[in-house]
Amino acid sequence: MALDQVTGLNSLGFAKPEHETRVVVAMSGGVDSSVVAAELACQGYDVVGVTLQLYDHGAALAKKGACCAGVDIHDARRVAEEMGFPHYVLDYENIFRDAVIDEFAESYLAGATPVPCIRCNERVKFKDLLETAKDLDADCMATGHYIQRKMGENGPELHQAADPVRDQSYFLFSTTPEQLAYLRFPLGHLASKEETRALARDHGLALSEKPDSQDICFVPDGNYATVIEKLRPGAAEPGDIVDPDGNVLGRHRGVIHYTIGQRRGLGIGGLSTPLYVVKLDVDRAEVVVGPKEMLATRIVPLKEVNWLGDAPFDSREAWEVSVKIRSTKPPMEAVLRPLSATTGEVKLLSPEEGVSPGQACVFYETGGTRVLGGGWIWRGA
């Protein structure tokens, strides 16, 4: 491919030929990152594939439906061999445990509901792996995430993917401006996952129909409690299920088995009004339940705010934004009030149910696609 005649840049934004542009592709072994690597290799870029081994390789071989497992490492290596570019597997088990898994366990023990995929992007893939890419003299690092990087007046901006179903902006809110300058997301403009699979078929990749990963990679079958009990023996201490006044309604198997907003599996049937988990009191080993209206929240306190707007976060008293407080729901209108450079408070214009500490709150430009950053929900409103 030739340089763009208007900008003088190649498709990755560099003023030099593709074969002189080295790009490290973070390859999970799935369809998305494999297509990114194959496409860039076919365009003539100097591609280097890197796959991270994040947890026990032997256990991973028997695990389907999660990234970075043993079979996925094999798939990534095979794509590299077929497309003719070098591929490396890096052992990041210790880094992953320290940066992601341990905090995941501690968060659950503290009554929070963590999102480890965000921490993995923030602390492993876009930190240690990105530095490795620089050590390999790469001009940039590309991933298979469905999100768009666009150039604005003040530099690169983060935008939602063209396909709202595949959009992964919720999981990438903590990307810093410095990281964004180095990262590329070649799939963000595609209209659907079927387009990605079609590209995989065009390249003759055997994994073109490989299922998407569904679970957190180190959590077999979505059973968080089992993993936490293995990491922290004795974590599942039984206790009382109580109403807001402290009346005992039943017993629970351990706070780690419950989440805010949960209705099923409480074992307290026979009541006239459906009850939901409204609070997890770790210190008292109590699960507090109440009527649905107790879940409604308007004020959401945030910490560790990462701001991607043009003006400093705390340069205004308030920002009118749209926010996501869970990955599966569309953005809702809100007012964001900075309390410091890294803390803030979101006021939702409409109350939302099931807001849980440990989850992320991601900010978007109202009426647009730009990601303005986000923060971590740190306590109940």
Image (cartoon, helix red, strand yellow):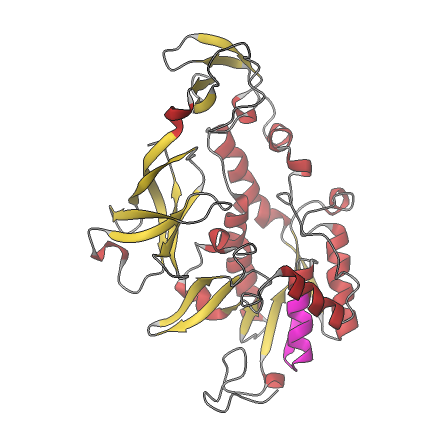
Q: Residue at x 36, y 11 (%)?
A: 245
Residue 123 is at least partly visible in this image: yes
Q: Please name whichever residue, 155 or 56, is drawn nearer the observer in this view of the structure.
A: 155
Seen in the picture, residue 136 relative to 227 is either above or below; the reply is below
* Magenta-highlighted residues: 35-48
In the image: residue 250, left or right of residue 39: left
Q: Using the rendered view, name the quadrant where residue 295 is placed.
A: top left
* Residue 366 pos. (x, y %): 34, 57
Residue 50 is at least partly visible in this image: no
* Residue 124 pos. (x, y %): 54, 54
Q: Using the rendered view, name the quadrant where residue 105 is placed.
A: top right
**Where does the N terminus fall, quadrant-wise?**
bottom right
In the image: residue 112, left or right of residue 24: left
In the image: residue 108, left or right of residue 157: right
**Where does the C terminus fall, quadrant-wise?**
top left
Q: Residue at x 68, y 37 (%)?
A: 221
Q: Residue at x 50, y 39 (%)?
A: 114
Seen in the picture, residue 46 relative to 105 is either above or below; the reply is below
